[in-house]
Image (cartoon, rainbow, N blue to C red):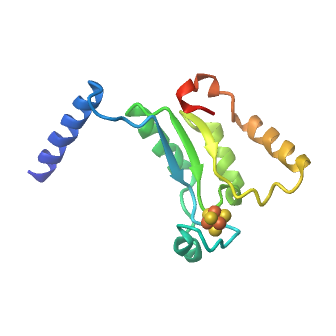
Amino acid sequence: MRYLSNANRIYKVQKLTMSRKIYRPKALEIEMTYVCNLRCISCAILDDIKKGTFGFSAKEIISILSQLKSIGINYYSLTGGEPFVHYDILRSVIADAPIDLIKINTNGFYFSTPKIVRETLGELKESGFGLRNKTIPAWLNI
Ligand code: SF4
């Protein structure tokens, strides 16, 4: 019974959303990991970082992104923790994501020289970063 009532509520929200009477998010940010190489005192999730919880696998993130696509969300960004701690996962997600990546929040620790930045951006591009982004609309203002 409760399930039915929830299903009805979801249906009503979907109906309202489709008729654009309520706000519908266009993008979503995923905290892909609670692992970080820094310990900033101002960090909002430092407790989680200290626990060292790993976070999502690439497969789990792709699954989330597929669900987002099915409800009309076409853009995502990644944050942590520090996403570049799990560079392999980051590259896999970029390669297989069904929607567009618009931002990676990083503390920049690993980008100590322009050469490293160029090489990393080159590798991310090889994985597919920026190749789908021709569809990004102006309202994203990036
Ligand atoms: S770099 Fe960011 S995620 Fe890491 S401890 Fe500092 S504020 Fe928190």
**Looking at the rendering, in which quadrant would you find the C terminus?**
top right
Q: Quadrant of residue 77?
A: top right
Q: Is residue 140 left or right of residue 112?
A: left
Compared with 66, 48 (above or below) is below
Nearer to me, 37 or 142: 142
Compared with 39, 131 (above or below) is above
Which image quadrant shows ligand 1?
A: bottom right
Residue 133 appearing in the image: yes
How far from the left and from the top, in percent, is residue 102? 61, 37
How far from the left and from the top, in percent, is residue 2? 12, 53
Q: In this view, does 80 lie to the left or right of 66?
A: right
Q: Which residue is drawn at 91% across and 47% down?
A: 115
Q: Is residue 12 left or right of residue 124?
A: left
Residue 35 appearing in the image: no
Q: Quadrant of residue 86?
A: bottom right
Q: Which residue is drawn at 18% across and 35% down?
A: 12
Q: In this view, does 73 lie to the left or right of 117?
A: left
